[in-house]
């Protein structure tokens, strides 16, 4: 979980001085125990830092201002140990720009039936205080995650852990540069969108660079660098005969390595976290840089094909959320359908660009012709994916808002595809193909998506809440009628949303 080591989450306990200084001292000591317990649980990916009790409006304001200006702080957890009159939170909550989690818990697990007196009850009144605080969040329409449960329980900690992963991905997206080599594929609508709004709303900064700039970097790549990288390929992957040393297509592997080195160097120089390519914009390239896209995705660079910068950014965000979890994430595209009753599935692939983190076995380096783009035969990693549950997600621009669409899917084992030498996945959308694919299409979802094993809908709920964007969830509980109604309701909600605040 190294990706999270540079981050911290602040814990602030709400109280007031009504119950006297001794009570506040006890609140402080309980809070310390809770924070220590959370950190020692081993269930949280990000360290929790206790920031003390807040007993007045000024104290809340001062802690939240500090949270805003501390780069390491990716979010704030608030808990009302005692009754904390909520007007004192208004100024602070108005200025807090970091993600907020409201934890509704209690220090004691059980009521001490035989000994409880009024003092104990006054000290342990989160049931009371968290409602007062809940009201002000509701009244202010403050985006937040509410976690309800006993703080020592794994389930409660699990909800906090999800939010932490999403908050880390959110912090990452606030300084995300997406480099585009070429524009959108001409005439394609769904992958396009408002880049100014994307930067205001999601933090994404999108820049275009001429492919000639990348070619200038590529011209300086040395043979030694290429040899070193190809040796790395040989350690990591199986090789088809024509791709091996002395094989008739060995040159394609060498040229693919040259492209990979150049793109990585270019992205590093710009400080970019994601990039897009376009097969219509490859002047000076030997081949479509598919292998480079596959390997750079595995390193954590977001990728979108055909200029799809929104998906490139979401692939990066998904990779951050997945850090340290098994399964992996990737860019994917809905390609071909396999009608088979209740097992009707979608073959997910792309021309070449599927991330090897989701491979079931050792990927195989192969070189084959590609009937698109008019370049030389490209090298690529070929594999099928693991099986199991995951989420496919996308973001589309609805004109007055961004809409995230997330679909729970189950990856199943495909039959061999001897004539299709690209990486692929085969999944059944939940609740089934008819409602899952139908709901995605009704919502205006892209043909491209960001996919991850082992994430749940909760991650996307937290992300949409923090970003303040619409989320259409399609899972085992969805019906077509509910999705259609939600789309209509949301159109009204987002028109009125600003007026409500
Ligand atoms: Mn595509």
Image (cartoon, helix red, strand yellow):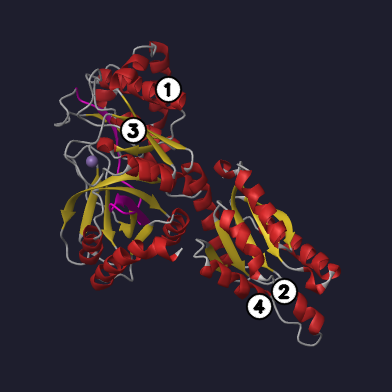
- Give the image location of residue 144, x and y in percent: 52, 61
Per the rendering, the mark at residue 293 is 3
Q: Residue at x 15, y 60 (%)?
A: 339
What residue would you read off at disc 1? 265
What residue would you read off at disc 4? 128
**Going by the image, does 337 lie left or right of 234?**
left
Q: Quadrant of ligand 1?
A: top left
| Sequence order check, earlier mark of 4 and 2 | 2
- Alpha carbon separation for disc pair 4 and 2: 15 Å
| Residue 440 can be seen in this image | yes
| Sequence order check, earlier mark of 2 and 3 | 2
Mark 3 and mark 1 in contact? Answer it, CB < 8 Å: no
Mark 2 and mark 3 in contact? Answer it, CB < 8 Å: no
Q: Residue at x 37, y 21 (%)?
A: 262
Q: Say which of 499 and 404 sits in front.
A: 499
Mark 4 and mark 3 in contact? Answer it, CB < 8 Å: no
Q: Say which of 232 and 105 sits in front.
A: 105
| Sequence order check, earlier mark of 1 and 2 | 2
- Alpha carbon separation for disc pair 1 and 2: 54 Å
Q: Say which of 372 and 129 sits in front.
A: 129
- Alpha carbon separation for disc pair 4 and 3: 53 Å
| Sequence order check, earlier mark of 4 and 3 | 4
- Give the image location of residue 452, x and y in percent: 39, 50
Q: Which corner quadrant of the image does residue 90 belong to?
A: bottom right
Query: Which range of residues does the magenta coloring cover?
Result: 376-401
Q: How many marks?
A: 4
- Give the image location of residue 267, x and y in percent: 42, 27
Mark 3, mark 1: which one is toward the viewer? 1
Q: Which corner quadrant of the image does residue 176 belong to?
A: top left
Per the rendering, the mark at residue 108 is 2
SS at circle 3: helix
């Amino acid at each position: 979980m190294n990706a999270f080591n540079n981050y911290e989450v602040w814990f602030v306990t709400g109280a007031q001085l009504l119950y006297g200084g001794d009570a506040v001292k006890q609140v402080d000591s309980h809070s310390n125990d809770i924070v220590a317990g959370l950190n020692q649980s081993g269930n949280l990916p990000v360290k929790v830092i206790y920031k003390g009790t807040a007993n007045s409006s000024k104290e809340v304001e001062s802690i939240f201002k500090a949270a805003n200006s501390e780069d390491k702080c990716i979010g704030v957890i608030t808990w009302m140990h005692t009754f904390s009159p909520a007007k004192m939170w208004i100024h602070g909550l108005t200025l807090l720009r970091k993600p907020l989690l409201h934890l509704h818990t209690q220090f004691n697990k059980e009521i001490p039936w035989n000994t409880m007196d009024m003092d104990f009850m006054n000290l342990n009144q989160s049931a009371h205080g968290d409602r007062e605080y809940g009201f002000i969040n509701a009244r202010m329409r403050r985006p937040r995650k509410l976690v309800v449960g006993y703080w020592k329980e794994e389930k409660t900690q699990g909800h906090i852990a999800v939010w932490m992963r999403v908050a880390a991905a959110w912090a990452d997206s606030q300084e995300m540069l997406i480099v585009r080599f070429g524009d959108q594929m001409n005439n394609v609508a769904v992958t396009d969108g408002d880049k100014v709004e994307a930067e205001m709303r999601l933090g994404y900064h999108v820049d275009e660079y001429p492919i000639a700039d990348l070619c200038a970097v590529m011209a300086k790549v040395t043979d030694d660098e290429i040899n070193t990288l190809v040796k790395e390929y040989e350690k990591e992957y199986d090789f088809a005969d024509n791709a091996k040393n002395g094989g008739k297509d060995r040159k394609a592997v060498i040229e693919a390595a040259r492209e990979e080195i150049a793109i990585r160097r270019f992205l590093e120089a710009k400080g970019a976290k994601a990039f897009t390519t376009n097969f219509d914009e490859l002047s000076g390239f030997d081949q479509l840089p598919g292998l480079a896209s596959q390997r750079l995705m595995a390193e954590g660079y977001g990728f979108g094909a055909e200029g799809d910068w929104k998906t490139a950014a979401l692939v990066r965000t998904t990779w951050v959320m997945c850090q340290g979890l098994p399964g992996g994430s990737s860019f994917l595209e809905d390609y071909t359908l396999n009608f088979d009753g209740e097992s009707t599935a979608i073959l997910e692939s792309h021309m070449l660009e599927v991330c090897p983190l989701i491979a079931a076995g050792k990927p195989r380096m192969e070189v084959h012709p590609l009937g698109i783009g008019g370049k030389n035969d490209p090298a690529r990693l070929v594999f099928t994916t693991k099986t199991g549950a995951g989420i496919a997600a996308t973001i589309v621009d609805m004109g007055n808002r961004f809409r995230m669409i997330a679909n729970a899917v189950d990856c199943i084992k495909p039959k061999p595809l001897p004539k299709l030498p690209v990486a692929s996945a085969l999944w059944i959308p939940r609740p089934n193909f008819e409602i899952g694919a139908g709901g995605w299409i009704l919502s205006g979802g892209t043909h491209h998506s960001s996919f991850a094993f082992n994430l749940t809908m909760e991650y996307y709920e937290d992300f949409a809440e923090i970003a303040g964007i619409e989320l259409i969830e399609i899972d085992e509980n969805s019906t077509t009628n509910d999705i259609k109604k939600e789309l209509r309701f949301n159109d009204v909600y987002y028109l009125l949303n600003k007026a409500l605040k």
